[in-house]
Image: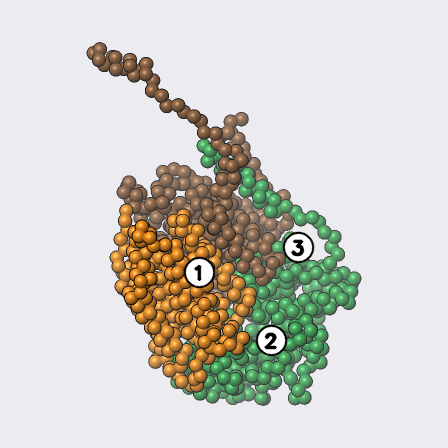
Chain colours: A orange, B green, C brown
Amino acid sequence: MLTALITGLAIGALYAAAALAYNVMYSTSKVLSVTTGHIFMVSGVVGAYLIGELKLPTVVGFFGAAAAGVVFGLITEFVAIRRVLARSDEHLWLLSTLALATIIQQGVGLWWGTEPKPFPRLIPQDFTAGIWDQKFWLPIATVAVLMVGLELFYRRTLFGKIFIAVSEDAFAARARGVATDRVRAISYAIAGLLGGIAGFAAGQLTYAYFALGLSLTLNGFIALAVGGLGSNMGAVVGGIVLGLLTSIATFYFGGAYQQTIAVGLLMTFLLVKPEGLFGDKRTRHV
Amino acid sequence: MFRREVVSRLLVAAGALSAAALLPSPAQAQETIKIGWLSSLTGALSSAAIAENQGVQFAIDEINKAGGINGKKLELLTRDTTGDPTKAVNLANQLIHSDKAVAIIGPVNSGESLATVPVVAKAGIPNIIIGTVDELTDPVKYPRAFRVISTNEQWIRSANAYATKTLKRSKVALIGDTTGYGVASTKKAAALLEEQGIKPVYSVVVDPNKTSLTEEMTKAREAGADVVMPWTAATGLLARILNARGDMQWNVPVVGHPAIMGTPIRALLNAPTYWENTFSVGYASTTYGPDKKLPPATQKLMDEIRPKLGGKIDFTFWWVAMGYDTVKVLEHAIKTAGSTDPAAIQAALEKTQNLKGVYSPSYSWGPKERNGFPDAGIAINRASTFNEGSFERAPQ
Amino acid sequence: MNSHQGRLAVLLVGLVALATLPFWAHDPYQVHLATLIGAYWILVAGLNLVVGYTGLLSIGHVGLLAIGSYAFAILVDHHGANPYVAMLAAGAIGGVCGFILGLPSLRLPGFYFAMATMAFSMIVSEFLLAQDSLTGGGAGIAVPGFNKPFDTPNGLFWLVMLIAAFVTWLTWNVSRLMWGRAMIALRDSDVAAAAVGVPVFSIKLIVYTFSGVTAAVAGALFGSLQSYVTPETFHFELGLFFFICIVIGGRGAIIGPLLGTIVLTALPEVVAPLAKLGQFFYGALLLLVVLLVPEGIGNLVKIVREKIRPRRLEKHVVAPDLARLAAAIGNRSAS
C-alpha cells in the first residue's frame, strides 16, 4: 500500500508538472496546447539517448534534455501558435497543436523505435531501495523545486512580472511597450524547460517511450482542471490528487477501469466546481 | 444565390474528384504472382512485424533469384496497417480487389486479424495467419485461412505444463495487461489451469504503461504465490514485473509470454541478474541443443540472412524464421496446386503433412485442421540466454 | 436554362453518378471505400452541425460510433432483432448517450469540453474491453449484415447512400433555415446570441443529441461494413479524424466537410504504399492545411473562383428622387 502511495505521488508529480506547463503556456497565449505531454516524452527520449546510447555524462544529458524541451516549446509557439492566434479561432490552435503533436510522436517513433527503451540510472543507487528509490523521489523533488522556482520567477524577477502583466491584460501590456509576441515565445520556452527538466527526472519511472505524450496531455489536463486553470498551487495539488487517486484505485480494484476513474474525477470537478480548487471564477468581458 | 451556385458546382467537383480517384488503373499483364503482406510496421507489435518482414522479404528474394515459381516471379505487396483494424480491413480489400493478390499473409496483430480474416475469407482468398488468437482459424467459417504460428492456447498450455509439471508449482499468480490480448489470455490461462485442478491465487490485469508493478507483486507474494505467469506482450510491463521481483528480492520463477525473453527487456532491467529464474515460451527451432548447436535449418537461414540484417542478429530470431516460412508455405502450396487458383491452394494445403520449415520442424494441416504448428515445436527457454536470436532450453 | 434549373441538373447528375457507382467503379474495393466514406459521412454530417455550425470542439464522437456498432451487433446477434429495427434502436441509444454526455459537458468552455469528449471515448473503450460477457471483450464481436435487398456489398452501399442522402438533406435544411443562423450566431459569439434570445443551451443539447443519433446509425452501418469490430477499431485517433474532416473541409458549410471526409478517407489509401511514413505525412499535411488554408478546402474553391471570375459588383447610385420628395412635401404644406 505504501508503494502505491509513493508511486501515486511520483506520477502525480509528473501530472503536476504537465499542469504547470499548461499554465505557463496558457497565461500568455490563452491556448491549451495538445503538445504539452509530448515535451516530457521528447526530453525523456533525448536524455536516454545522450546518456544511455552516446554514453555522455549525466550533466550533459540533463542539459541536452532540458534544451530539447526548450526547443520543442519554441517550435510549438512558432509553428502552431503564432500564425493561428492571429485568427482567434478556437478550433485552429487545437488542430495545429494536434498536428504538431502527431508529427513529433511519429517522428520520434521512427527514429527512436516504438518499444520503450531504458532510461539510465542518474545517481548510483542500489535497486533494492524500495520506496526510497530515486525513480520516485526524483520527480517529486524536481517538481517541488520547479514550482518554487516558478513562483520566485513570477514574483521576484522583472521578467516574471512582465509575464503576469501580459497574462492579465495583453493589450495594456502592449500599450506599455511590452513585446507580447516575444514574451509569448519565451513563455513557451519556459514551459518547454519545465517539461524538459521534469521529463528527464521522471524518465526512470516512465522509460523512454515514444507514445507517452497523449496520455500525459490528458492527465495533465485533468490535473489542471481539478486544480484550477491559472493557479500553480492548484496545478500541483491537482496532479497529486489525480496521481494518488488512480494509484489507490488501481491498488484496490485492478487496472481495468483506470481511465474511467481518472475521468470520473474530472467530470465530478467540472460539474461541482468547474473553476477547480484554486482557480478564480472565470469571468468574461462581453 | 451565389452560395447555391457554389454548392452545386462543388457537388460536381466532388463527384468528379471521386470519379477521378476511382478511375480504373491501367490493366497489367499478370506476369507476377502477387502476394499481399499486411504488417503493422508502425504502431503496436512493430518490432515483431519488422523482424517478420525481414524473413518475408528474404524468402521472396530467394525464390525470385531461383527463378520464381513455375517461371513466374513473386511480387510482394507490403501494406503498413499501423495497428489499426479499420485500416487493415481497407488495405485487405485493396489487396484483394485492386491489386489482385492471390494470397495474403498476416496481419501480425490479433486485433487487426480478427477484423480482416472474415473479409479475406469472404473473398475466398487464401490467408496465411500469423496471429495467435485462437479464434482466427476455423475450417468451416474460414476454409482458406491456414495458420503458421502456434496458437495462443499452445503457448499457455506449454507454459502451464512447465510451471506445474516441471517446476512442480501449484500456487499461480497471473498478471495480464488491459489490452484485448491480455484480458483474454489471462482468462484462458486461468481456465486451463482449472482444468488441471489448480486455481490461481492471484490474478490481475494492469495498464501496460503502469510505472511500477511493486504493489501487484507484493500482493502476489502475500497470497502465497510460488510462480508468476505474465500474459502480456508489452515489454515495459514485463520488464517492470521482473524489476519488481528483483527489487523485492523475491526469488520466484516467472514463466510466461515469449516477449519476456526479447532483447528490449535486457536493457530495461535494473540488473542483469533479474533475468535469471525467468522462463519463456519459445521454439525448438531457436533453442540451442545440448551440443550448443541450433537445428541445421535455423543455422542455415541465420547464416544466409545475417548480412541483410547488418551482420548482427539482435532480436528474437523466430520472428524472422516464421516470416520466411510463410512465404515458403505459399510456395509449396502453389507448386503443389500447379496454379494460383484459391480452391487448388486450399486443397494443396489441406493435404499437407509434415512440411519441413525453419520456424517449425513440420507443418501439418488437414480438411478439418487449420492450425499447422505441432505441439512438439514449442520449447521452454531460459530468458537470460539470448544469443544471436536464440536461447537455451530451460532446465527440465 | 436559368441558374436554378442548371443547379438542379448538376445535382441530379451528381446523384445519378453516385447511385450507379457500383457499376462504373473499377473493383469491389472501391465500392467498399465508397461505402466507408458514406458511413463516415453520416456521422460527420451530424457532427458538422455540432462542430462546424455550433462551434463545439467535440473530438470524442468515436465513442458514439462504437456504441452504435456494438448496440447493433448485440441486438441482432444476441437478441435476434431485425437489422433495420436494430439500426434505429442503436440510433436511439446513441441519441440518449449523446444527451447524457451533453447535459453536464455542454456548459463547459471549449478545451474543457474537448477533453470531456475525449475522456468519454476512452471510457467507452475501457467499458467495451472490461464487459466481455456482453461485448466479447478484447476479441471483439461479429457484426451481421442487413436483410434483402441490402445484403450484398453493393446493397450495403446503396443503403448507406440512401441514409447519407437523407441525413444530408436533413442537415442542409436545418442549416439554411433559422436554426442554421442561430447555430452560427452561437459559434461566433454565444453571449451576443443569448442577448438576442437564442436559446443557447437548448440548441447545443438538441444538436448534440442529434449528432449522437447519426453517429450511432453510422456505427451500425460501419460495423456491418467491417463485418467484425473490436475495441481497438474505435481508437481515439478516429474521433480526431472526424473532427479534422470538418475543420479541414471548412466550417459553416455542408459541402466542405463532405469534401473533407472524402479526401481524408481516401488519402491513407493513396499513402498506403509509403508504409512506415504514412502517419507522419498525415500529421504534416494536417499542419500545412491548418496553417495555409485555415478556412478549409471547401472555401478554398470559393476563394479560387473569386480570383478567376470575380463577381461583378453593380454600382448603385444612391440619389434622392427630388421631384417625388417635393411633391410629397408640397402636398403636405398644401393641406
For badge 3, the amino acid type reads: Asp
Foreground of the two, A152 or C136: A152
Q: Is residue B48 left or right of residue A146?
A: right
Badge 1 element: helix
CA neighbours of label 3 inside 10 A, class few (<14), some (14 to 19), many (20+) = some
For badge 1, the amino acid type reads: Leu
Q: Residue furthest top?
A: C334
Q: Which residue is mark 2?
A: B315
Q: Which mark is residue B99?
A: 3
Name the residue: 40% across, 51% down: A85
Q: Is residue B370 left or right of residue B341?
A: left
CA neighbours of label 2 inside 10 A, class few (<14), some (14 to 19), many (20+) = many
- Nearest to the eye among marks 2 and 3: give it: 2
Name the residue: 45% across, 79% down: A122
Q: Quadrant of residue B100?
A: bottom right
Q: Which residue is mark 1?
A: A74
Q: CA distance from mark 2 to mark 3?
A: 32 Å
